[in-house]
Image (tube, rainbow, N blue to C red):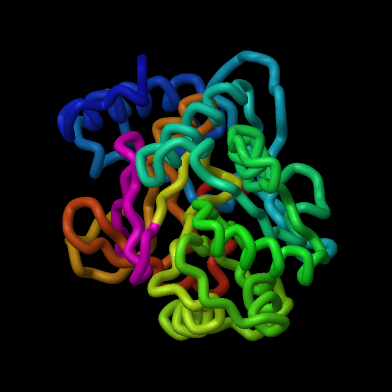
């Protein structure tokens, strides 16, 4: 099944239902979850009726639908002593196809850009899926200036200014707190550079609502819009925003909004609720995930992130507690 060759909504739904039945049979944890919900997988005929597994299960179980050898384990960041998510990957080539094709849909080929990464915290630990992705994008770039920058803020600042003046196409991918650190050192007026934030203060700074954050970053970098990447350890696909906090997904990834009080009930466009994600690239783990994020769907193919659930680690997991 070629999940990256989806022609229309009907094709997506057909492939999603096929993958659901495959995972309901071959993923031991998901199979048990569905049984406890008393759902017959072969009675499910709509994507909206598929049970979504709480994302917290990645902290509790090894979620595998494939029998192949695990090639990599991606882990989430967390505070000392906290339980982190583990995403077992049996096919790194599938992940690479997903993020390269996804990036290409929104930005074109990475070789067209100088790709600069400011990802402290991620870069300093093992098992980051974000670092794996950005490293591959950097390797695909034809610019000798592409690379990771950790504490070299002055060097990065001067490079940004020089490349921008020369008219080079640049993407600066940065974690939120590091981008704020950078514009406190230097103010910019960039004309040829895309600033892409990946979210996360990671306890380094006080959390700021997205609109205010983007206003601060726009002023600091001298750009009209801030781009964003939405991904997580538990996914092999990413959504992107080219401004205004509105995200779009690639064709093999879809967003649904669930009721915060009844996780089996889905809400319509314009309603605020929990974000459910269908990621067909997760065929070898689990493609149907109920996240901790709150959001709103705007039209058929756009959504925005509004925050996170409070105390949501337990929600949806008690079915599997013995």
Residue drawn at x 20%, y 68% is 270
Q: Is residue 59 magenta?
A: no
Whether residue 61 appears in this view of the structure is: no
Name the chief secondary structure element in magenta: loop
Whether residue 156 appears in this view of the structure is: yes
Residue 122 horizontal side relative to residue 314, left or right: right
The boundaries of the magenta stretch are: 241-263
Please determine whether, in this image, residue 57 is positioned above or below residue 140: below
Name the residue nearer the viewer: 14 or 245. 245
Residue drawn at x 58%, y 52% is 56
- Residue that lies at the very extreme toward the front in this rendered image: 166
Name the residue nearer the viewer: 201 or 90. 201
Residue drawn at x 72%, y 57% is 77
Residue 289 horizontal side relative to residue 146, left or right: left
Q: Position of residue 234 (x, y in %)?
A: 56, 44
Q: Position of residue 311 (x, y in %)?
A: 57, 72
């Amino acid at each position: 099944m070629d999940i990256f060759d989806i022609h229309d909504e009907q094709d997506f739904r057909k492939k999603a239902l096929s993958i659901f039945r495959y995972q309901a049979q071959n993923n031991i944890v998901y199979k048990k979850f569905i049984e406890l919900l008393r759902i017959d997988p072969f009675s499910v005929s709509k994507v909206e009726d598929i049970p979504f597994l709480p994302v917290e299960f990645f902290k509790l179980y090894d979620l595998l639908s494939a029998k192949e050898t695990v090639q990599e384990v991606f882990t989430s960041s967390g505070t000392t002593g906290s339980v982190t998510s583990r995403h077992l990957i049996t096919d790194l080539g599938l992940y690479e196809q997903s993020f390269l094709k996804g990036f290409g849909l929104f930005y074109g080929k990475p070789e067209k850009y100088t790709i600069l990464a400011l990802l402290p915290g991620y870069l300093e630990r093992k098992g980051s899926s974000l670092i794996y992705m950005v490293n591959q994008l950097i390797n695909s770039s034809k610019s000798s200036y592409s690379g990771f920058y950790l504490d070299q803020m002055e060097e990065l600042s001067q490079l940004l200014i020089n490349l921008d003046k020369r008219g080079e196409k640049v993407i600066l991918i940065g974690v939120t707190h590091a981008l704020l650190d950078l514009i406190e050192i230097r103010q910019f007026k960039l004309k040829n550079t895309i600033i892409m934030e990946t979210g996360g203060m990671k306890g380094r700074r006080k959390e700021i609502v997205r609109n205010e954050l983007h206003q601060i970053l726009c002023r600091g970098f001298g750009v009209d819009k801030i781009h964003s990447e939405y991904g997580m350890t538990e996914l092999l696909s990413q959504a992107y925003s080219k401004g205004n906090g509105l995200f779009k997904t690639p064709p093999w990834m879809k967003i649904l909004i669930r009721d915060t009080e009844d996780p089996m009930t889905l809400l319509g466009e314009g309603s605020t609720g929990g974000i459910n994600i269908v990621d067909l690239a997760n065929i070898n783990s689990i493609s149907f995930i109920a996240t901790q994020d709150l959001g709103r769907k705007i039209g058929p193919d756009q959504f925005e992130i509004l925050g996170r659930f409070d105390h949501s680690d337990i929600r949806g997991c008690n079915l599997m507690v013995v």
